[in-house]
Structure formats: C-alpha cells, structure tokens
Amino acid sequence: MLWKKESIGKDARLVDFLDSERTHHKHIFSLFDDISESKKVLEKSGKLSTHYRKKAMSQLESKNWHEAIELLNEALCFAENDSQDVGGAYAERSTCFFNLHMYDHCLTDIKLARSSKCPQVVQAKLSKLRESCKKMLKISPNTEAEDDFKPTLSFDASEQCPFVANVVKIEGKEKMGRCITATRDIDVGQAIMVEEGFVWSTTENYRRCCVCLETTNPLVPCKNCTDSLMCFGKCEKNQLHEIECNMGLPTVNGKEVNGKEVNFQLVVRSILMALKTIPNLNELIRFVERIVSAEDNEPINSASTPLSRYAVFLENGLKWQWPKKENKTYIGHIKRIHEAFMDNDDFAELFEDDDHERFLRHLIGHHICALQYATPNVCIGENDGTSVHSIIGRFFFHSCYPNAVLVTSDRSTVAVTIRPIEKGEEVTVSYLPDELNRSTKYRRKWLLVQYNLMCFCSRCTQPATAASNATALSKLQKNELRNASNRDPKKQAKRRNLTVACTKYLNANGREQWCDDIYYMLHAYIQLLCTKYYLNLKH
C-alpha cells in the first residue's frame, strides 16, 4: 500500500490511500474523530500544585532529596503561570539541590524563585541559602561533578564509524545483512558502542527534560501543558516541544486506538529529524524515492552521518508492513499524525499542495513501519518509560547466549560486553525480554512469533544433557547477587563490589556452556549495567 502510484507513468501521483479507506470505512474514521475531540487535557491547577508540594515536603523531612525533586517538578508543571506556587516550588527544590551538594543548581533555582512571585519570608531564606552556596563553592567545587557520569567508548573510536570502538567493525553478510564483529579479543565490561539515538521519547515526564532526556539540569515547566519540563536556559528555547505541545496528540504510546503500540512521539520526532536532515522538501522526496525504489544498491555499512543514518532508518521501513487486517488501525494512526502536522501553519505551508500532502502521509506510514520493525527490538533501548531508537543498535543480531547488552543513558544507547569475545566473533545481544533462563522450546516459539526468527546459537543447539565447567556459585554468592537490582544512588559502593565480582566471574567462565550459575551472573550484571547507565553514575 505504501508508495504505490495511481499509474505506471513517470509522473504518476502517489495513491491517496487515506481517501480510499475513508470511503470504505467511514465508521472507523468517525471513531478516531470522536477520540480526538474527547481527549481529556489536564489544566494548570493551583490545588494540584499545592498537593504535590505537600507530598514533596514529606520527602524533604525524610531527606529523600531525589524523590522530593521529582514531586516538586510535578508541582511546577501544575502551578498556574506567574503564581506563588511557581516561586515556592523553585525555593523548595533549591533546598534539595543544596543538600545534594549541587550548589550551581541550587543557585539557579534561587534565581528562578526570586524572579517568580515568591513570598517575602521565603525571599529572606533564599538570601541566606545563596550565601551558604557561595561559601561551599569556595571551599570545594561541586561534589556532584565527581559522580557525574557520561558514557564513553572503552577504546578509541573506529575510523569506519565514530559511534563504535576500533575493536569491532560493521560488515555486511549476504543472507543476514549488516552485523558487528570483533577485530580483537575483548574482555567483559567494555563499552564498544555509544550512539546518540536517532529519535527518542519518554514518559518520565517529571524526571527528565522532554527535549534532551537529561536529568542532571534544573528543569523548568512548559507554560501550556502539565506534563513536560525542559532544561533551564538550554532546551526551554528549543522549538521541539512547542511543536509537539501544539499538536495535541494523545499519549506518547498512542494506546487509545485499538490498543496498538505505536509511539506517536517517536513518529513525529522522526519526521522532524528527516526535515532537519534534508530541509529542502523536493530533495527529501527524491532521497526517499531512491531508498524506497532501491536505486542505491551499495550497502550502507557505516551509518556515521545524519544522512546515512536516515537512509538506514528508511531501509528498515521496507522490512516491515502492518498486517492487512490492521489496515484500518494503522491508517487511523497516519490520519491522526498527518492532521496534527497540517494544523501547524508552518507545516501546512511546507506541504502546500495535494501531492506534498500525499507524500507526507506515505512518509508517516513508512516511519511507523521503521519504528515498528524495531519495537520492542534491540534498537529500542527502553528504561523505565524512556525509549531511544538506535540505528547501529539494529546491526546486533540475536543470541540466547549473548556476549553484549544494550542499555540506555539519557538519549544514548550503549553496547557493553557481558562475556569475553574472541577476534572474528560476532557481537550479539538478546531480543528476549528478560527471559534468558526459559526453555529452548519457549524461546524459539517466542522468537518465531515476534520476529519470525529461528535461533541457532550455541545454547539452542547444545544437547540438553551437556555439562558446564563453569565455577559453581555458593548460596551466599547467589543471595548477594539479588542486591544487583537496588537502584538507590547511595548504594554505589555495594554495586561496585558486585560489578567487580560479576566481571571477574564472567571473564573466567563466560565462554563455558550455559548453566544456571552463568545465568545468575549474567542477569545480575545486566541489572547493574542498566542501573549504572540509567542513573548516570559510576556504578
């Protein structure tokens, strides 16, 4: 259906599938219209803002600073513009930053509180807090800088692609397509890929900046909606959220329509990324047509530039198509997103004629396919509601006995080795959703249903009676591994010790045949890595 034309002529127009479906399924489109009109939007409310500030005070009294900050962020989102609730929430959040030794952030919040309608009694307290901050900054620099963590490659970057280390290479295989192989032996715990996502989204509305996904900067609320915050002085000036906010699409996951998991925010952002990569509409149309018609037969094995990454993204869209029985649902998604774009004057001017509108509808459908091809696949790093769509991450193939794992850190996807890898060996990850210890029969059935994939990894083909020479774990060791899931930022020392134990064990035993003890170690190590990168801490 996508990219079909009305005739075989050179200048034939794209089929307006939206119009043809509307003719046959009027009741479906009226249903979508009803949903759009009845969408409930939470408005700014001083009562709700006060409610969340009270909950935050409870956390402040218990010295749960991070939890208090999240609640105060929610209070800021619901506070009516230019009200005392805004100044009060900033003032209370500044106290949290001070106690976390984040003095620069504390000073920023003091400045924000003073510029808002803040009671005189609070102003006096802020003056004292400001002086304390300045004194602490003279005594010692911000201690949060010591714990601040940004993912980096464990080796020099590859000349082939700056997002991967020079110990691996991207290559094409005739039947399998692109894959990643090691060019030297690699130990456990090495970051071999750090790639900023092609697009990203989050439902952690009161913890992260909705534009860049970072959690380490002071956040300011959107003046229009009640579920978005942006980095002060940086992302608040970015037009991305303004565009999304004015579109008024339903939820991030788009579950309202027949329960289909189409992430509306990712689709919108991927269209915006396409327009940013190729600003000229006619050039964009020609570029997409070349990829769709497979005019460029040369495989793209680097994905190192925005243009080559977008080309790979478009290629992925050719590998997935929604089932015919779901036509109505997916066309409904396209209709919703298309109308949201056309309600914006700038986009209405850009896609000014019917041919351009048809192109936009087909492009939205194609982007949905590219994202669905990945969901919830390896190239979507998901961590507590945050989704990062990685292009190179899709080059890792599946194994039920993986030697690497993909984790997210803000808007980056990081590939970390979890077993020793030998030179020439393919780097693999697991597509299974935390079900590594299930039976071969279960895993194969799940992979076949989800990805039409039959796994022939060493674990799936080894005899069921095969013995492993891996070192057995004691009961005490197994009990210790249960602490790997603890995400308390204060428990870094404990996680560091567990990380050292896991790395040592997996380096020594990671090439042995699969057994329960290896599973316990892999499971714990993956949890430790997820926590490390999710919290952006050293451990």
Image: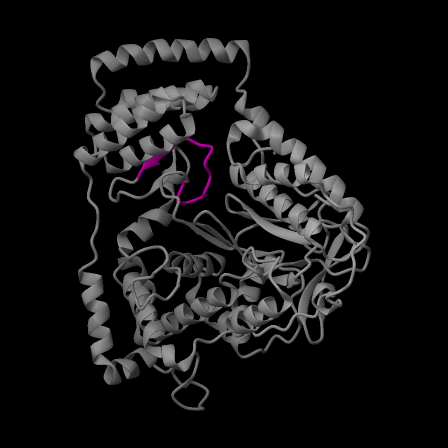
Q: Outermost residue, front direction?
A: 475
In the rendered image, the vertical position of residue 312 relative to residue 129, given as above or below: below
Query: Which portion, as a residue range, is magenta?
Result: 209-221
In the rendered image, the vertical position of residue 326 relative to residue 376, given as above or below: below
In the rendered image, the vertical position of residue 426 relative to residue 406, given as above or below: below
Q: Which quadrant: the N terminus? A: bottom left
Point 20% across, 68% down: residue: 33
Residue 473, x across and y down, in percent: 72, 43
Q: Is residue 72 left or right of residue 317?
A: left
Using the rendered image of the protein, determine whether residue 43 is visible from the camera's viewpoint.
Answer: yes
Point 54% across, 20% down: residue: 143
Point 58% across, 29% down: residue: 492
* Rendered image quadrant of residue 481: top right
Magenta stretch holds residue 469: no
Q: Is residue 211 left or right of residue 464?
A: left
Question: Which is nearer the eye, 488 or 127?
Answer: 488
Main SS category, magenta section: loop
Question: Which is nearer the eye, 237 or 447?
Answer: 447
Question: Which is nearer the eye, 143 or 236?
Answer: 143
